[in-house]
């Protein structure tokens, strides 16, 4: 006899299976999503009003990031899910830090003693010619949960919010010791996510492609020493490009391990993040390899976009044109 629970489990498996093998030509089979770090300032000032503008611009799927309000832009996971759903969008993923929060210093240099905040921009002043980044006052921010110390709580909240993926946005990877500790965190988080019925992924910056002691890169070590069924990648296309890596080649090396993408563009100087379509990333070629990657969701991101809603509208328009 088939119970309601059996039916729902089977239906869920079929749905996830259909997402795992989307049909792509040059156009995405899924609606276009956005990573909310793009609108860091507006989301901290007016989360509901900003989300309404995001929906009005045409975005349908949301990936959240850290907030100066704490939690999920000042809300619980259940509350935030309802706000997003009421606007006709879906909350698909959330970014969490891999280690305790450490603000980046105002001048250059690595953050003291730990990872930068999830989704944070490079340390130090912006490159010459780049727009100024908004000031971030972390002194009044509530404590941030991190995967090292709070992975089960973050997994439980992700499940409560109905998310498909929990994502590690950043973690210390400057030394072999830091990488090994991060790998341990990823494995246990991936296991907890699997038990909760959600996926786990790691989001790269360019530093993951810098060799450490022994000549291996953090990217190579993380992918080779974690279970490919438990730890997936959210490939940031701009940071991979900055590091001199070809996203399509990375897909071919680890087929099916890239269910999430950050659709981000970078200018020819490889320092300035810009609106999608205004830089050098070859999105048409990359999207043509979506099946190989195993891509399920993708999120437009422009780190703290200086143009706000205007910038995300430009990115959406350009991406639709590129993939038409």
Image (cartoon, rainbow, N blue to C red):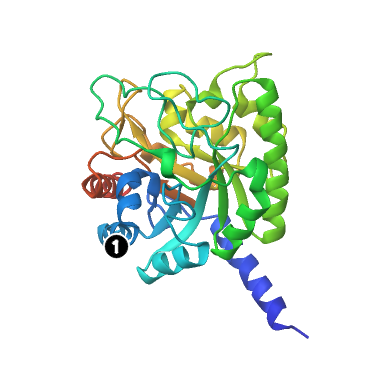
Residue 31 placement (x, y as % from top left): 39, 58
Give residue 127's quadrant in the image.
top left
Frontmost residue, 122 versus 253: 122
Q: Looking at this view, name the residue that lies furthest to the bottom.
A: 1
Task: Evaluate whether residue 29 shows in this view.
Answer: no
Q: Looking at this view, name the residue that lies furthest to the top.
A: 214
Residue 147 placement (x, y as % from top left): 63, 44
Task: Evaluate whether residue 55 shows in this view.
Answer: yes
Residue 41 placement (x, y as % from top left): 31, 45
Q: How many marks?
A: 1
Q: Residues within 10 Å of mark 1 (few under 14, many from 20)?
A: some
**Quadrant position of the N terminus in the picture:** bottom right
Q: Which residue, given by chain and number where applicable, does mark 1 sit on?
A: 52
Residue 26 placement (x, y as % from top left): 38, 47
Tell me what residue is drawn at x 44 percent, y 69 percent.
82
Residue 247 lies left or right of residue 121; in this view the side is right
Residue 261 lies left or right of residue 106; in this view the side is right
């Amino acid at each position: 006899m088939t119970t309601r629970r059996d039916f729902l489990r089977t239906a869920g498996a079929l749905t996830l299976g259909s997402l795992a093998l989307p049909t792509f030509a040059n156009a995405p089979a899924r609606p276009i999503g956005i990573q909310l770090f793009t609108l860091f300032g507006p989301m901290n000032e007016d989360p509901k009003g900003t989300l309404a503008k995001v929906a009005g611009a045409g975005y349908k799927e949301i990936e959240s990031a850290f907030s100066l309000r704490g939690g999920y832009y000042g809300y619980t996971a259940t509350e935030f899910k309802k706000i997003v759903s009421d606007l006709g969008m879906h909350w698909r993923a959330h970014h969490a830090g891999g280690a305790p929060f450490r603000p980046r210093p105002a001048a250059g240099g690595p953050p003291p003693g730990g990872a930068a905040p999830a989704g944070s921009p490079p340390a130090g002043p912006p490159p010459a010619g780049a727009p100024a980044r908004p000031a971030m006052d972390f002194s009044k921010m509530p404590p941030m949960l991190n995967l090292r110390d709070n992975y089960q709580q973050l997994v439980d909240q992700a499940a409560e919010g109905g998310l498909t993926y929990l994502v590690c946005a950043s973690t210390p990877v400057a030394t072999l010791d830091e990488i090994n500790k991060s790998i341990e965190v990823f494995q246990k988080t991936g296991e907890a996510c699997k038990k909760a019925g959600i996926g786990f992924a790691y989001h790269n910056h360019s530093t993951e492609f810098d060799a450490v002691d022994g000549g291996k890169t953090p990217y190579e070590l993380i992918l080779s020493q974690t279970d490919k069924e438990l730890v997936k990648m959210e490939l940031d296309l701009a940071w991979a490009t900055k590091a001199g890596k070809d996203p399509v080649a990375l897909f071919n090396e680890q087929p099916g391990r890239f269910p999430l993408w950050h659709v981000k563009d970078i200018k020819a100087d490889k320092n300035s993040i810009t609106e999608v379509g205004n830089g050098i990333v070859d999105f048409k070629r990359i999207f043509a390899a979506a099946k190989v990657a195993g891509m399920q969701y993708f999120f437009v991101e422009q780190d703290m976009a200086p143009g706000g809603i205007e910038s995300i509208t430009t990115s959406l328009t350009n991406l639709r044109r590129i993939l038409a």
